[in-house]
Amino acid sequence: MTAFGKALTITETPIPGLLLVDLPVHGDARGWFKENWQREKMVAAGLPDFGPVQNNISFNDAIGTTRGIHAEPWDKWVSVATGRIFGAWVDLRAGETFGRVFTAEIDPSRAILVPRGVGNSYQTLEADTAYTYLVNDHWSPDAAYSFLNLADETAAIAWPIPLDQVEISPKDRAHPRLADVTPIGPRKTLVVGASGQLGLALRAALGDAEHVEYTTRETLDLRDPELAVARRWRDYGTIINAAAYTAVDHAETAEGRAEAWAANVTGVSPLARIATENGLTLVHVSSDYVFDGTKDGPYTETDEVRPLGVYGQTKAAGDAIVATVPRHYILRTSWVIGDGRNFVRTMASLAERGVAPRVVGDQIGRLTFTADLAAAIRHLLDVSAPFGLYNVTGGGEPRSWADIARAVYRLTGHDPAAVTPVTTEEYFADQAGPIAPRPRNSVLDLARITATGWTPRDADAALADYLSADDA
């Protein structure tokens, strides 16, 4: 019997993400009416905005018709238009809740959101039951499914009508027991630019998990016109864009300008489009070069961008594209140090060779080590932090490049007085070729990332650790 007049109510179940929902149903002498899925109201009430793209109806003539248990790689919104069902759901996702069971009766005044990888099944309790469900992906024979036998002894589902007395398809009767089920893994994570400094740090942070894929320019061509269909993108949950053009001085040349725009803007566009069309999270790394460096104090996430040179312009343009993706994280960083050739290793090499360098002393910022940047990316994804822009650098007191050079000399056992601070103009006075303008102030405010529960590592301490690791 359909219950009328209930309030829209969401109840969590023992299976994470499986949400039982009471629906308002309005009835009179003519019949009844309900809003089966109403995005604005239901998202406001706490349901995820799961983005349905297909609506299916399964009509069942007789009482006892039994279907399932099927786990699919998409989310489902299950309800009934007429009749009543006994529903049974089993978590078939890899993890600690694998095999957990939940059952409930569903009539027109109830619905249930079934997350990807949770096995779905039902038994009709009335004749002429119209079972309806919305899904957020189109059916595909190439998708990864998992199945469980309706009579599995471990799940021990208490079917109202014994399974030997009901109509079940031969295919459903042949499904495996729980011990033989192939679990549904998490959505895939794709790391683009995995051979760069940040890409290598992401390899260390994310490891060799089966659901993480690493690509390079050679294995994923962002200019491929078939990129949108090159993969089954609905199987992915996250794209981390660690690829970028960072040769800031060369970007001021005609050739470098074209390369910078191609990598930092044109290459970002297809990733943003794929993420938007498939409901993926896009992670992108920005730069302090989007600012002109004239602000008195740290830059916040809400400060307007004012890039000085070509590199900063391309980064600002790429940020604007990524910001249109509903599910995005932009990590704005500065003075990145990782594996390979970089400022810290150059200073350490000069110190070992007894060179007394002239180093810029009027540009202020904080070092950011790629291990910390990768850790911040993982943190934002792990805690499902609010989407948007986050400043991410090392913590502690801001330093000049000359300050950092002195610290490198001191930490490697050499005289920091060998470093002579000079102005930016003095440093580049004798340089040949185009020189990109640099922001004098690259200090970024870290309050927003800290509020998510991630504390940036002190940049001075991180520098000492980095040099110690190089000596090991």
Image: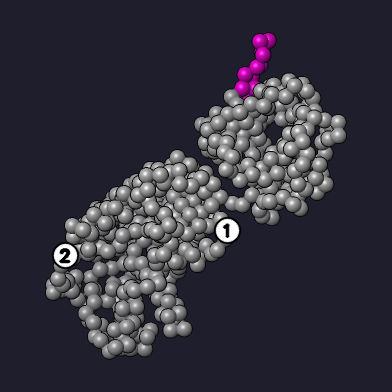
Q: Mark 2 sits on what residue?
A: 434
Whether tag 2 and tag 1 are in contact, CB under 8 A, the answer is: no
Seen at 15% across and 72% down, the residue is 431
Check residue 210 in the rendering and tell me which mark sits there, or answer none. 1
Q: Callout 1: few (<14), some (14-19), or many (20+) C-alpha neighbours within 10 Å?
A: few
Seen at 64% across and 39% down, the residue is 114
Seen at 48% across and 54% down, the residue is 190
Seen at 28% across and 73% down, the residue is 401
Check residue 291 in the rendering and tell me which mark sits there, or answer none. none
**Kind of residue sitting beneath label 1:** Glu
Q: Nearer the viewer, residue 269 or 11?
A: 269
Q: Nearer the viewer, residue 287 or 195?
A: 195
Using residue 245 as the reference point, say whether residue 196 is left or right of it. right
The secondary element bearing badge 1 is classed as loop
Using residue 190 as the reference point, say whether residue 397 is left or right of it. left
**Kind of residue sitting beneath label 2:** Pro
Read off the magenta span.
24-34
Q: Position of residue 171 (x, y in %)?
A: 74, 38
Q: In the image, is residue 27 part of the stretch drawn in magenta?
A: yes
Q: Position of residue 329 (x, y in %)?
A: 43, 51
Q: In the image, is residue 426 part of the stretch drawn in magenta?
A: no
Q: Earlier in the sequence, mark 2 or mark 1?
A: 1
Please say whether residue 109 is visible from this viewpoint. Answer: no
